[in-house]
Amino acid sequence: MNISSESGMIFNIQKFSLNDGPGIRTVVFLKGCPLKCRWCANPESQYPKLQILWDREACVGCNTCVSDCPSGAITNVDGNIRIQNAQCQGCHTCIAHCPEDALNAEGESKTVDEILKICLQDKDFYEESGGGVTLSGGEALMQPQFSTALLRTLKEHGIHTAMETTGFASPEVFQSVLPYLDLLLFDMKHWDEKKHKEGTGVSNTQILKNLKQAIADGKDVLPRLPVIPDYNHSPADAEGFVRRLKEVGANRIQLLPFHQFGEKKYDMLHKTYAYADVPALHEEDLKEFQQVFLNHGIDTFF
């Protein structure tokens, strides 16, 4: 297959981003994630296929979506619209017929060539700012063929590439994308395997192996730590992360304070948000946490 026709499932393309690598960037968000982080800000990214989201605040209860869905994937249960995404055909009939725009789709199949054309629109901005394109998610490593094809094509056009990743992938998959990456933004959720599994649903053993391998291979790797209240933000946790950073050969880390940006999406997906009543963290809340890393010679910033 021509790699330009390789297709992937994405749920957003964000232009002019300044937070996902150097310079001005286009961020391509891919669907599907093997982790189920309880604080995830993009819960719509976890399911690998198209999803229909329901906005209860916009809905007037007309049941047009229920009656018009050709696959019978939509029901009304006590005033709540329920969508069986596994049964959905992706025809968008419900969205087109909704009089109040209370339904929207998350997930769209696009080819490498289609995404490349969007990215090339801003190549001048990349060159002037030292920017480029970042793959995010979800987890791009869940779509390895598509991600590799897209990254390879971007490199062929002289574009700086980055990937935000959980690092949860087989060594073979992980190694397949490395040659086409200029920067890895590598999440560290927890230093302890048991706590990591409690918070994300998976072990961190292979994640740490992949992180260590990328650093050993000389890749530009920035470990990033989402700091979550009552999960990984104590001084003792900071000491644990320092040990892991030294084990993998890293000497810097970016702290990402917990926020509430994705809360409404959980309701639209009929999911319970475990952190609904937990206050957001701010940089000033994490000075003691940050100082632990600095005391060990780890370059630590927000």
Image (cartoon, rainbow, N blue to C red):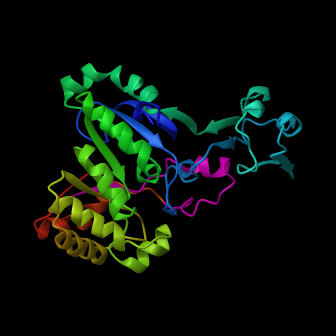
> x and y percent of residue 233 in the render?
35, 69
Above-or-below relation of 73 to 242: above
Above-or-below relation of 292 to 19: below
Q: Which residue is at 45% across, 41% downward?
A: 29
Q: Quadrant for the N terminus, please.
A: top left
Q: Which residue is at 26% across, 43% downward?
A: 180
Quadrant in which residue 270 is drawn: bottom right
Quadrant in which residue 71 is drawn: top right
Q: Name the residue at the right extreme.
A: 67
Question: Can residue 252 be seen here?
Answer: no
Q: Is 197 on the left or on the right of 295, as rendered? A: right
Magenta stretch encompasses residue 163: no
> x and y percent of residue 269 in the render?
66, 50
Task: Identify which residue, 128 or 62, lies in the foreground.
Answer: 128
Task: Identify which residue, 95 or 33, lies in the foreground.
Answer: 33
Above-or-below relation of 277 to 78: below
> x and y percent of residue 293 in the render?
18, 67
Q: Which residue is at 76% across, 49% downward?
A: 87
Q: Which residue is at 38% across, 36% downward?
A: 27
Task: Identify which residue, 95 or 163, lies in the foreground.
Answer: 163
Q: Is 200 on the left or on the right of 17, as rendered? A: right
The magenta segment is 252-278
